[in-house]
Image (spheres, helix red, strand yellow):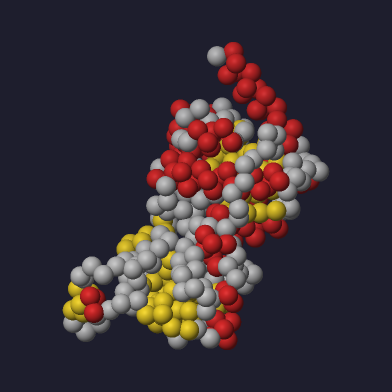
Amino acid sequence: MTSHTSKLTAISDGTLLDTRAIRPIVEPVARKRLVKAKAAYTTRRVPINEASYLISGDVIPKSGDLVLARVDRLGQHCRIELGNGRRAPLFPGDEIILCYGNRYAPDQFEGEIPDNLGPCHMVAAGGIAANAISKHAGKKAATRITPIGLLADVNGRPINLADSALEPITPGDEMPMIIAAVGTSMNAGKTTAAAYLIKGLVNAGLKVGAAKVTGTGAGGDVWLMTDAGAELVFDFTDAGFASTHRVSLRELESIVTTLTAHLQQAGVDVIVMEVADGLFQEETSALLCSPVFRQAVDGIIFAAADAMGAATGVNWLYDHDLPVVAVSGKLTASPLTVRETQGATGLPVMGLDQLSDPGISETIRQHLDSHLRSRQVG
């Protein structure tokens, strides 16, 4: 948790501060102060009222550590998503509770966990504290924050999101059918496709569970899948991760196994799983190439914005022996692009009306049966 390595850190006036003189400082924190602070979505599983201390000084934060911070200057994120989904306005001077985490978002920010409790940024409205090291040209600068201290329990130990994670359990023998929504990139239409697929399966009379297994902590996708009719929705924060950028393959596999096992235990008939970002994103690529993922998933809906992306992505998935059921995503807005995609992939291209139709369940089963027979013949 702590480091006493000699470090010289520049402060606001350019002076070099020798951090060897700083040691961890553990101070009591008033419960009223924590109640008043705006706690982000990423922290929703954590019983924050059990925090007894703040740790400041020479501390190296870890991914998932909860931090009480002060808003210094508003930037791209001028609201914070609370645990209940409400997007609360932020004001300079507000105290907020976030999780440290890395972020990978090509259309927003790249963020990395700092090696100290110095000023940094809120790089996601769902509650991620990090140093913003790059951003999309169309976005404002990241909202600046100053960490006040890590939240600590009664024993003075930093409170981490992993402390409140779902218990890892072993899946039973009979897993529900699992359909994954995968795409070319962020904002290709994966979540929308997943939500409408959920609606179609619910319309068919099935009990549906959903899981978002990678990404950056935020509730929008969870709320959308819930509103589509899923009985139970988990995301990677339920498995103890504020973000999945820079986590190991073993941890990614554990997220998939844990979330699907809990959905199985809840008695769902089918699971819709979303994998964030695109095929070339490091963690996404590693997970999709994993035997654990391949064995877990029965079929894939691939989301893309154009025919070229769809064809390239489908071929990539085939090369990795993954069963693609259909193509969907933003490209379905254009009938011409739909025709191009059908010709390039030989797959059905499903718009939102088709995904939400009660017949989608049987369509998927028939396609999977056909895929299995072709593999057996091959």
Residue at x 62% of width, y 46% of height: 169
Q: In this orientation, does residue 67 appear? A: no
Front residue of 39/167: it is: 167
Q: In this view, does 89 lie above or below 98?
A: below
Question: Where does residue 230 sit, x and y in percent of width and height?
Answer: 71, 52
Q: How many marks?
A: 0
Q: Is 144 in front, or is 332? A: 144
User: Could you tell me residue 184's position as x and y percent?
Assistant: 47, 43
Location of residue 161 with respect to 192 vertically, above or below: below
Q: Nearer the viewer, residue 329 or 146?
A: 146
Report the residue at 60% width, 65% height from top.
45
Residue beneath the point at 53% across and 45% down: 254
Q: In this view, does 143 lie to the left or right of 228?
A: left
* Furthest residue toward right: 205
Query: Closest to the observer: 38 or 29?
Result: 29
Quadrant assignment, res 1: bottom left
| Residue at x 46% of width, y 53% of height | 244
Q: Is residue 30 left or right of residue 57?
A: right
Q: Can residue 93 be seen in this view?
A: yes
Residue 107 lies left or right of residue 175; in this view the side is: left
Give the percent coordinates (x, y) of residue 270. 70, 41
Q: In which quarter of the image is the C terminus?
A: top right
Q: Specify the farthest residue to the top.
A: 377
